[in-house]
Amino acid sequence: MEVEISVEAEKKRLNNWVALTVVILSVLMGLGKLKDDNIVQARQLLKADAIDGWSEYQSKKIKQHLAESSLRQARMLAIANPAAAPALAIQQQAIARDAARYSQEAQALQARARAKEEGFEALNARHELFDVSDAALSIAVACAAVAALSANLLPLLMAWTLGGVGLFFWLAGFAGWAVRADAIIALLG
């Protein structure tokens, strides 16, 4: 009788630990999912802004090349027709100013587009941390379920270990730590 009571007490204690583990892991997964969704939205906006920036950059570069081409044509016309040279000189100055302005604007647009891409890459690294965290926490919940079904402590210890890994990447994602998960991502990808 005493042995049956202690076995039931052990099972109840194990199930309590499993329940507490599952609750904690589920809360972490839920909070991580919310943060990751916000990061994904920010990534999408940055990527769209970067694409827009590169499109503007290309447009300015095309305008710059057209202005430079027009300038070359005006110079050739001035050489071919010296009588028109004074009138063409005024146009050449205006075209040269436009070309210089397009060049400066293109450089500024290029710098902004690169900054947006760098921001995207930083958010992408954080997103990957949450992906690894979510995978580890999901596997940990599954291990905890196996512990409850088998009434065995070993799967619960595995759940705690994987939960610790998931928690580490979860914290790294929230805090923006410069943790690289490239090897794990490559393994999963």
Image (spheres, rainbow, N blue to C red):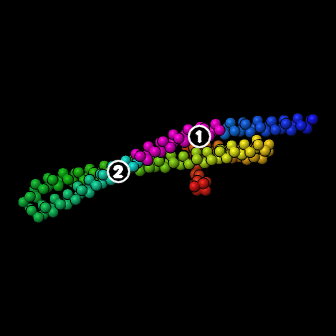
Left or right: 36 with respect to 80? right
Residue furthest to the front in view is 149
Residue 96 position in % (x across, y down): 21, 54
Mark 2 = which residue? Answer: 55
Q: Amino acid at mark 1?
A: Gly
Residue 58 position in % (x across, y down): 33, 53
Task: Count neighbours of disc 1 (C-alpha within 10 A) and say few if under 14, some if 14 to 19, many if 20 or more.
Answer: many
Magenta region, residue range? 26-49
The answer to whether 85 is drawn above or below residue 160 in the figure is below
Q: Amino acid at mark 2?
A: Ser
Badge 1 element: helix
Task: Please check the rendered image and state whether residue 33 is part of the magenta-colored stretch, yes or no.
Answer: yes
- What secondary structure is the magenta-colored segment mainly? helix
Mark 1 = which residue? Answer: 32
Q: Earlier in the sequence, mark 1 or mark 2?
A: 1
Q: CA distance from mark 1 to mark 2?
A: 34 Å
